Amino acid sequence: MNRHQFSRRVALTVCTISVLCGQTPAPSLSIELNHRKAPVSPALYGLMTEEINYSYDGGLYAELIHNRTFRSDWSGVLNWFLLQKGTSAARLSIDQHNGPSAALTRSAKLEVTAADVKSPAGLLNEGYWGFPVRTNTRYAGSLFAKASSPDAVPVTIALVANQSGKVLAKTSVTLAGAEWKQYSFELHSGEMATASSENHFELLLDRPATLWLQLISLFPPTYHNRPNGNRVDLMEKLSAMHPAFLRFPGGNYLEGDHIEDRFDWKKTIGPLLDRPTHPSTWSYHSSDGMGLLEFLEWCEDLHMDPVLAVYGGYSLRGQFVKPGPDLEPYVEDALDEIEYVTGSAIDTKWGAVRARNGHPAPFSLHYVEVGNEDQFDKAKTYDGRYAQFYQAIKAKYPNLQIIATTPVSSMTPDVLDDHYYKQEQGMFDEAKHYDQTDRKGPKIFVGEWATREGSPTPNFGAALGDAAFMTGLERNSDVVVMASYAPLLVNVNPGGMQWSSDLVGYNALNSYGSPSYYAQVMFASCLGDSSVESSVGQAGERFFYSATASSSKLCLKLVNASSMPQPLAIALHGLAKGSAHLAHVSTLHANTTWATNTIDEPNRIVPVHSTVTLKENNSSYVIPPYSIQVISLDLK
Ligand code: AHR
C-alpha cells in the first residue's frame, strides 16, 4: 500500500465508524481539556549516545580515513594496504619511535625503493566500508609527514573507484624536509561522479623516497561546516527528533573495560595531534575525534542540553575505585570536566583551556550523571562513590542535578537513571510502570530504553512497544523528567553492529530511520506542558494512549498494537459545544509487526499525514490495526 492509498484507508475507516459503532458501542475516550493533571517535562525526549556500532568513527563523526593514526596488530597496519603498481617496489612498517607529538609517538614509515610516473607506489585506505563519493563535492584533507631527505617529494592523493580504478578526485601535495609538518589538501569530485561508496583513498609517490606519515585525515562537507564535524544526513535525522538533551559519553563506553580504558576526557580535547586515542568497550578502537568539545558542539548545533556522564570509579570488567582518598583524583577530574564545560574563559583554568580549544563561550549544564549502570558493581561501592561525587559537585555547583545510576541507600539522589531493554510484550507491560511511582522519591531519567525486536534496526512490532512505553512516560512526566532511547546509531555493514536494535542505520553513503525512529519523531513533534485528565472505556488490551496539552494545542497519542481496528468515541470536554475542530494526524502503520525499513528500502514505514474533524462530544474514530497515531489539535 502506498502513502496515498493508506491515507484513503485511514479516511475511509473514520467515515465508516458509525456503522461499526452501530454494532458495538465504541469505548469512549474522554479528555477533560480544562483539567490539567500534572506537568510534562519540556526535556522529556532526548538522545543517548556512545561509541558503539561505529556510532562516531564510521558514523556520525565525519572522518573518512579509517585508522588515521596507523594502529597495527599482528596482521599489519589496520585498514591500510601497501600499493605497488607496475614495476614499483615499496615497504610499509610502523616506526615505534617516530611520531609527531607526545600523544602520537608512532608513525607509518613508507619506503619507496622503486617508482616512476607509470609505476607509482604508496598507500591505500579502505575507509569505513568504503568512501562516499558524490557529484561535485569538496573533501578537506590534511596529513602530518616528514621525509628522510630535504628534497621535495610530490605525492598524489586521490579517491578511486574500487572496481573500475577510475580516479574520482585527485590532487597533489609536495612534502619536504626532515621535520614533522602538517600539510592540507582538497579533493573535488567532478560533475561525472555518481554517488557511490565503493571507493578507496590512495596516496602515491612516483619516485623513490622514505616518508613518515601520521594523522592522514579526509572530511566531506559537515553539518554547519564545522571543521572536525559531523555527517550531515545523520545530524538532520537527529534534528528531526527535536531532542532536548544529549546524554554522553555512555553507556559502557564511559566506563571502559578497565579503569585505564575509561573515557578519559582530558585526552580527548585540543588538537587531534594531542589525542592518543583509546580502546572502547565495544571491540574496536576509538579515534577520539568525537572528544568532549565535539560532544558539546553537537549539543550546540541541535540546541540540546548536555547531560554529562562523568567517570564514577567503576569499569565494566569489575575494577572499581574505593570511595575515600583513592577516589579523590577521579572526583577532581569530574570537577575539572564540569569547569571545562561551564567555566568562564577568563577566570577559570579549564574554561580557559576550552577557549584555547576554540570555544570561549561556556555551555549551560543542568545534569551530571555519576557513572553508568553501577548496579553491576559486585563490591557494592556505589553508595559511597555517589555520595563523594555528590558532595564535591554540589559544594561547587549547588544548582546541578546529580543523577545516580542505581538506587543508593544513604541518601535520595536528585535523579535516578532507569534502563529498560525488553521485547514487545515486556514494553507493553512497562507502559504502566510509572503510574504508581512514589512522587516523593527522586525524579526519574529513563537514560536507556528500547523494545528489542529486529536487527540491525527495530521492526514495526518494536515501534509499537516503544510507542506504548512512551505513552506511559508522557502520562508520568511529572516524575519522569527525561528519557532517551539506546543505542541511537548503527553502521549496518557486516561487522559494524555490536548491539542489535538501534534507532538509525547507515552505511558510508546513506542512512535511514527505523519504525522506532519515526515513532520518536512523531511523539516529540507534539508535546503539551501538562497531562490532561482523561479516561477510556473498555478498549482492547493492546490499546495505549496519552493526552497532553498546552494553552494552544492538545497532543493525543494513540497506539493500537493489535491486528484489529480500535474504534473510539472521542469526547473533548472543554471545546466549545457544536464547534468542529480540524486536527492533524500523523500515522505510522504496517501490515505486520515484523515489517521494517532497511538501508535499501528506507521508506517502507514512514509517517503519513492526514486531517480529521473532531468535536466536543463523541467524535467517531477508528485507529487502524497496527498503528501509532499522533493527533495535534489547535485549541486557539
Ligand atoms: O546501550 C547499550 C548498552 O546497554 C550500554 O552501553 C549500557 O549502559 C547498557 O547495558
Image: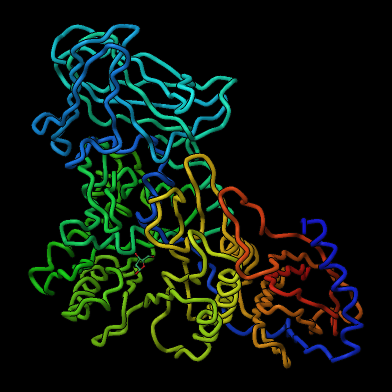
Q: Residue at x 40, y 77 (%)?
A: 418
Residue 217 placement, left or right of 159 = left
Residue 465 placement, left or right of 58 = right
* Whole-percent x, y for residue 40 in the image: 56, 75
Indicate the quadrant where residue 173 lies.
top left
* Whole-percent x, y for residue 112 in the image: 20, 15
Vertical placement of residue 527 versus 618, above or below: above
Residue 481 shows in the view: yes
Vertical placement of residue 385 versus 300, above or below: below
Q: Residue at x 33, y 38 (%)?
A: 66
Residue 571 shows in the view: no
Residue 432 placement, left or right of 206 = right
In this view, the residue in front, 205 or 213, is: 205
* Whole-percent x, y for residue 217 in the image: 34, 31
Residue lying at the far front in this picture: please name it. 87
In this view, the residue in front, 211 or 123, is: 123
Total numbered labels: 0
